[in-house]
Amino acid sequence: MRSGRVLVTLVVALFGVAAFLGYRGELAIPGSDSMGEVAAIAQAPPLIPLDPVAVAAQVQPALVNIEVEAAPFGISAAGSGIVLTEDGQILTSHHVIKGADELSVTDLGNGLIYQATVLGYDSSADIALLSLAGASGLPTARLGTSADLRIRQDVLAIGDAGGDGGEQTSVAGPITDLDAAIVAMNSADMSRKSLRGMVEIAAPVVGGQSGGALVDGTGAVVGVITAASGERTPAEQQTRPANGYAVPIDTAMRIVAQIRSGTPTDTVHVGPTATLGVQIVDAHPTAGARVTWAFYGQPARTAGITDGDVITAVDGTTITTAKALSAAINIRKPADLVRLDVTAPDGTTRTVEVVLAAGTPN
């Protein structure tokens, strides 16, 4: 059953009003250090006025539409991406490609469709890097720096708002926070993720623009669109104030550099994704990762791990939480052999050898 070409929309809840009335960090209090901050802001170079039409025309050729197929569930989704290199490295949001069995990418500069592979991702920061097969000579985005962004600066969010693979659309608005903390809910699988250090803009960003570009008045990419708030809920007669959220480009490119180095970390995954084929939660009251479901045909169940088993170590390294187990598998590759220390529900322990399978980005 296809759900249609609709991008995973992230609905966010703020932890606090970090930019009340847009005066974050700019209210002068006599005798405080904020007077110096205001003076510094006053001496900063004037902001370049934003021409939404001109900036969108400048950036659009360096953007792509991403179509995701998740075969086991018979669904499809769509999102956006930013062209980083002429040979087809694409920056996008992790949630856009989460669970993807197949990825096809339409380049807006030349109209060609490419098959894509995932080079790596950091799910905790919602950033992913793709590679397009057979791409060359692609128009690339000009990157700016998020370090120079300022409150009330007008920026443009541009991406495939309809999630239909069509022409990119854009919305403009002022920056209202440079360090927003949000809880993002993935409407595809209802999972939640805490994200910090987000750039918040007062603009009606919508699903489909995720993975697209946040752009300043010069046409430089300063962020990767991640989430939106302000959607209408069934019990509401009016929408809440619309906001968009983006990962600062400096943060995104640090993750890209880590992926390009070929060295994985606890959060940055490089290359094909390995999987045990289990759902896990923290084990209580003991330490470890308790298996709530071992999927049929997947490595864990094939090796004899069943629902209720608690995994307490990977290759001799103690596992105390579900997150720790995920991190341990994150740095491994498909076909790797791992030795798991397992405690059964009756308290008996055993060591199980498992050959990891290839999984989807998650």
Image (spheres, rainbow, N blue to C red):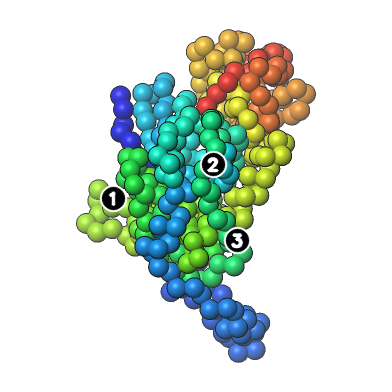
The CA distance from mark 1 to mark 3 is: 35 Å
Q: Earlier in the sequence, mark 1 or mark 2?
A: 2
Residue occupying the point 54% across, 15% down: 298
Q: From the viewer's perspective, tell me whether residue 322 is left or right of residue 192.
A: right
Task: Determine whether the residue tagged by mark 1 lies in a helix, strand or loop.
Answer: loop
User: Which numbered marker is on residue 137?
Assistant: 2
Crowding near the residue tagged with mark 3, few <14, some 14–19, many ≥20 C-alpha atoms within 10 Å: some
User: Which numbered marker is on residue 233?
Assistant: 1
- Between 229 and 68, the one nearer to me in the picture: 68
Q: Quadrant of the N terminus?
A: top left
Above or below 131: residue 20 = below
Occupied quadrant, residue 77: top left
Residue occupying the point 48% across, 40% down: 95
User: Which numbered marker is on residue 32?
Assistant: none
Q: Give the x, y percent position of residue 152.
A: 47, 72
Q: Identify the residue under disc 3.
A: 145
Residue kind at label 1, given as amino acid type = Thr
- Between 138 and 11, the one nearer to me in the picture: 138
Residue kind at label 2, given as amino acid type = Gly
Q: Residue furthest left?
A: 237
Above or below 204: residue 66 = above
Crowding near the residue tagged with mark 1, few <14, some 14–19, many ≥20 C-alpha atoms within 10 Å: few
Above or below 354: residue 207 = below
Residue kind at label 3, given as amino acid type = Thr
Task: Determine whether the residue tagged by mark 3 lies in a helix, strand or loop.
Answer: loop
Q: Residue furthest bottom?
A: 30
* Front label number (1 vs 3): 3
Determine if residue 176 is in view.
Answer: no
